Amino acid sequence: MVLILALLDLFGELKQHELSITLVRARFLKLLQARESQQLPVDPPPESVGQRWGTVQGFQINSLMQTPIKALSSVLIFDSGEQTLRFTDELRDQWSEQLASELREYAIRELDSYYEQQRPPVRTSLREYLTQVMSGYVEAKREPFTNHPLGTLIRRTIPQEIHKLPFINQSRMRIQGSVGMGNWATVPWIAIMDRSNTETTQRGEYIVYLFAHDMSAVYLTLAQGVTVPTKEMGRPGAYQYLRQKAEQIQTLLPLEGMYKDQNIQLTASGLGQDYQVSTVAYYRYDRDQLPSNEQLIADLRNVVENYTQYVEIQASNEQKELLAVEPLSVPDQVRAIQTYIRRKGFAYPNHLIENFYLCLKTKPFVILAGVSGTGKTKLVKLFAEAIGATSANRQFTLIPVRPDWSDPSDLLGYKDLSGAFRPGKLTEVLVEASLPENQNKPYFICLDEMNLARVEHYFSDLLSVLETKEWQEGRIVTMPLLHRDSLTSEEDRQRYGNLHLPDNVYLIGTVNMDETTHPFSKKVLDRANTIEFNYIHLGQYPEDEEEEGAPEITAVANSFLRSEYLQLVDVYRDNREFIQETTDKLVKINGILEDIHAHVGFRIRDAVCFYMLYNVRFELVDSAVAFDLQLLQKILPRVQGSSSAVKRMLLKLMEEALGRRLAMQELMEDASELYQNGSAYDEAKYPQSAKKIAFMLRRLEDDGFTSYWLS
């Protein structure tokens, strides 16, 4: 039966009905080794080849393969000349996915039956119970709730049978099943709780089987209670806390063979998001492809062992102290960063730190623009230091850009004449940030004076890769920056092969806009928030601080900064009204931009919506201030030109920024009244954008050309 399963695996992967015996032999051995490593029943290897399957090599089982091949001669044909194996012509002519599925089910049943005869039978048949629930629950929901047999199965029978398993500590474990309170639940569940951790699914951590609402699948999960954190923190705060706690637990436990992403598909409505954010790790079992009972029990044993290990860690004094320290809320953390920077003797305009944080959270690429000496590079360094990322621990790296940089090799590296790979400074940082022990630490890369060279030339690979982000096993991954096949030595392939941009790396470019630098294309501007440092108050002095001692550093996990939204669909369902309100504003502005073909696309719409959502969730600045910053940073940098159409467009944007109508005809002749009194914008709807538009209008009337950038 193991041979049949090996053949079915290869047929499904290769879409071939005639397979090399070498391939079959390798897969056959791999399945035997997998059963052994998962502590499933498996016949021992012949004494002549070793004591464990894990030490056996393919060529050693040539003769062993002949026994199952002969036993299956009625359905298999072995061609000794070609050294291939295939099913009979009769079976191949009838081949279909359904037949393959039936064969797999038959092989699993026969394998279970064989091993059940070799040892005392396992009394608990998880496979049978899960099948009963998934095949009968949808129909049961149409029937009376009280005393229904399926309710009894979930609430009593299955918990009692799980309690009998030898790896369940009966004195410590509480097992509870639920199909609802008075009415059928959308998602029934069966939970296993360690009483020293929790006795309710509303708080703490526990193991739980979660059934999809349509019974298409069941998930065995290590999960966290959502109800109590939501009551105490509100849903946004609870979600942030639960995600951070899930990441923390993942670093403590092996969780081998389990998924660590948030792809828990239980319902078509909002209920499913609670399960997604609270899940630490899981197995998924599709109804039509349930594994054997032995495998289900082995998986449960693995989760129980991980859960027990977590409870023991939590109980130890050192780890208990670590886990009991609640991370600062985002507003408190931002205030701690502001305090650190202020105590270092630097002061920045109101809302700048909040804005910088929201920009990094939205997308890990930010441009800081302005005249020399305004503290752009210092901001990056101090912000990173405040959360524990320093040059000393290599979590902050400054890379000065050279004017002669012309392609990505200047950043990423190149192959020398001998074929050896010479990594760039950026590549070395990415390698270190990608190490398993560093994946929960934020890494900052500051590209100093990044537009001394043409950004599109040396930064093009990173700009493209930024748009390939997707979730994979709980982390955000991108397409590779360096491909394994492009490297020559095995050492280089191991270290740099398939290197991607990890989700704990944040790229910040500082730029000056003058005759020595290059302008930005829309390709660059679309992918970044541009924060400007041009309004300088020289009469500003360091504040006298009464606090003594060195400024306090509060190290944070990467979840503080990492993006949580990659596509609008990730958040639209639960924030429909807010997203539509924000989009309506952008639609109106986009209509104005269309006059000079400067309108924006979906990438900018999504980025603005994410920025606004994070701000609402963390309550950092007023929503009008946040939208003003996005108009200033995502829209206005795209505007430049010398025509009357550009001026008309700027005047229309000024109407939006001021929140009132203007005398367009008169202002098209002379707009000086809009920029002669700078204080007039204090009462504007979007004062910072209004001030910038006034500067652009003045430059257009004085120089005959305008752009966002000072020069």
Image (cartoon, rainbow, N blue to C red):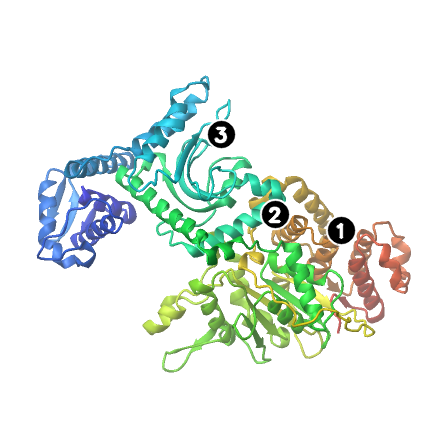
Determine which residue is flagged by label 3. 186
Q: Does the image show residue 80?
A: no
Q: Position of residue 695 (x, y in %)?
A: 81, 65
Look at the image and tell me in which quarter the C terminus lies: bottom right
| Above or below, 430 relative to 654 | below
The crowding category of the residue bearing disc 1, from other C-alpha atoms within 10 Å (few below 14, some 14 to 19, many at least 20), is: few
Determine which residue is flagged by label 2. 237
| Picture disc at residue 532 | none
Q: Residue at x 60, y 42 (%)?
A: 572
Question: Is disc 1 in contact with disc 3, using a CB cutoff of under 8 Å?
Answer: no
The crowding category of the residue bearing disc 2, from other C-alpha atoms within 10 Å (few below 14, some 14 to 19, many at least 20), is: some
Res 176 quadrant in image: top left
Q: For marks 1 and 3, give the one nearer the viewer.
A: 3
Q: Residue at x 46, y 39 (%)?
A: 265
Label 1 sits on what residue type? Ala
Between 214 and 74, the residue placed more toward the observer is 214
SS at mark 1 in the image: helix
Q: For marks 1 and 2, give the one nearer the viewer.
A: 2
Label 2 sits on what residue type? Gly
Q: Is residue 53 left or right of residue 70?
A: right
Determine which residue is flagged by label 1. 624
Q: Position of residue 437 (x, y in %)?
A: 44, 64
SS at mark 2 in the image: helix
